[in-house]
Image (cartoon, rainbow, N blue to C red):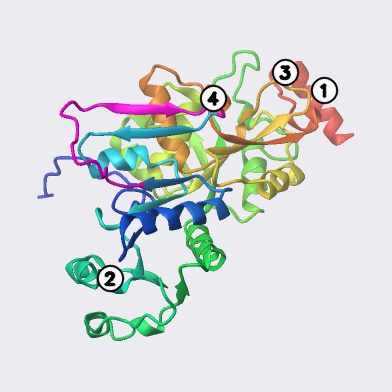
Amino acid sequence: MAKHKKHTNLERRNNDNFAPNEIAILGTNCGVVSDLVHKVSEKLSNYKLAYFDASHAKDVQENKLSEYTFHHEGNLQITTSGNVNKFEQRLQFAQYDYVFINGNHYQGAKQILILDEAKEASVFKRLEQLDNIQFIVKLKKETEFFDFLVKKFPNIKNKLCYTIDEVDKIAYHINNLIQEKIAPIKGLVLVGGKSTRMGKDKSELNYFGKPQKEHAKELLENNNFETYYSVQNESSVSSSAVEKSQFTNEISDVFLNLGPFGGICSAFQKDPNSAWLVLATDVPFVNDEVIRQLLKHRNPSKVATAIKGKNKEFVEPLITIYEPKAYSILLQYLAQGYSCPRKMLINSDVEIVEIEDSFIRNVNTPEEFEDVKREING
């Protein structure tokens, strides 16, 4: 008899202790840690960064006040006296490329150890927190490794070591750590949508000697993407159909009756650690050149990278690379009663790639289909 499972075994986004990608800095006083984070962050301004620290105030207010301070340039500083909860922090930090942690207060999944002779006792006290040291920073070049560190980590002297003033080198090292975690891309071709104006499934239309869904899939696969069909069939209601789709090139909707929005969310539920290049089947002029432009300008620090026609007002949500950080935002919009991916994109931090309008012409009626087919074949 199969063992009863109380909860569905969902795929989870890869997280460290508090964020998808984090590093704790410890070994010296909090002011030095904060100053180093500030200087390194200036060198990495193309990323979305956060600093997780504890309040150093002696008296913490009893009421759980959360303070949101908006700068006139649009920046936001958040101060809260709520309790630390790893699930809450993961939601707050889901949109960040990298989170620096004051390791004097919280343990990070990765660490930068600062060697400060005046804080030897503090490092000894936190020795168990040092389980994944990335590199060493010395306050003074002549500072020696503490004996207990060498005993605990016999190879610690072989780790890369910088002095505190080598900010460029430290920032470059951290940049590499960020790059290592950039998500791979998978392809998602949206098929099976109901088209009242066309009177048939637009993904089955033949422009290039085969159903358009096959042409779109080959277009993505030719760019080396593992590609899936997003299907909205009624059988996706049954768990057996969902389980079956895990072993095929289809992803059945588990967010039902939400159209493309549900297809995108279903893809993220299958794999929340990949970015998804979503492509509709009613834009037959999208070709390899368009896909290459999208990839060339991909910005993983944004929520998404989207195509927009030069004379169009809004981006095309179904010719878009959605980054893993988009998943939680899509679910937040769904919780507010919105199931329009374009609404999410135009209200989020998105990289926009402008191309000629002719590449993204939609085909919606039988007459348009015949005209476009003649144009393509002509």
Element under disc 1: helix
Nearest the camera: 228 or 355? 355
- Residue drawn at x 80%, y 26% is 372
Residues at badges 4 and 3 in contact (C-beta under 8 Å)?
Answer: no
The numbered dot on residue 366 is: 3
Q: Quadrant of the C terminus?
A: top right
**Mark 4 or 1 closer to N-term?**
4
Residues 282 and 164: in front is 164
**Closer to the eye: label 1 or 2:** 2
Check disc 2 and report the residue beneath it.
Answer: 118
What's the residue at 83%, 34% (across, down)?
376
Is there CB contact under 8 Å for labels 2 and 3? no
Specify few, some or many for label 2: CA neighbours under 10 Å numbering under 14, 14-19, or 20 or more.
Answer: few
Q: Nearer the viewer, residue 172 or 14?
A: 172
Magenta stretch secondary structure, dominant: loop
Judging by the rendered image, the residue that carries numbered circle 1 is: 371
Which residue, given by chain and number where applicable, does mark 4 sit on? 347
Q: Position of residue 192 (x, y in %)?
A: 53, 28
Inspect this view and state whether residue 135 appears. yes
Three-letter code for the amino acid on which mark 4 is drawn: Asn
Q: Give the percent coordinates (x, y) of residue 137.
A: 41, 71
> SS for tag 3?
helix
- Magenta span of residues: 52-73
| Amino acid type shown at disc 1 | Asp
Amino acid residing under circle 3: Pro
Within 10 Å of the Cα at label 1, are there few (<14), some (14-19), or many (20+) other Cα atoms? Answer: few
Q: In the rendered structure, which amino acid carries the disc numbered 2?
A: Ala
Q: Residues within 10 Å of mark 3 (few under 14, many from 20)?
A: some
- For marks 1 and 3, give the CA distance: 9 Å
Residue 80 horizontal/vertical position (percent): 28, 33
The one nearer the camera, 176 or 337, is 176
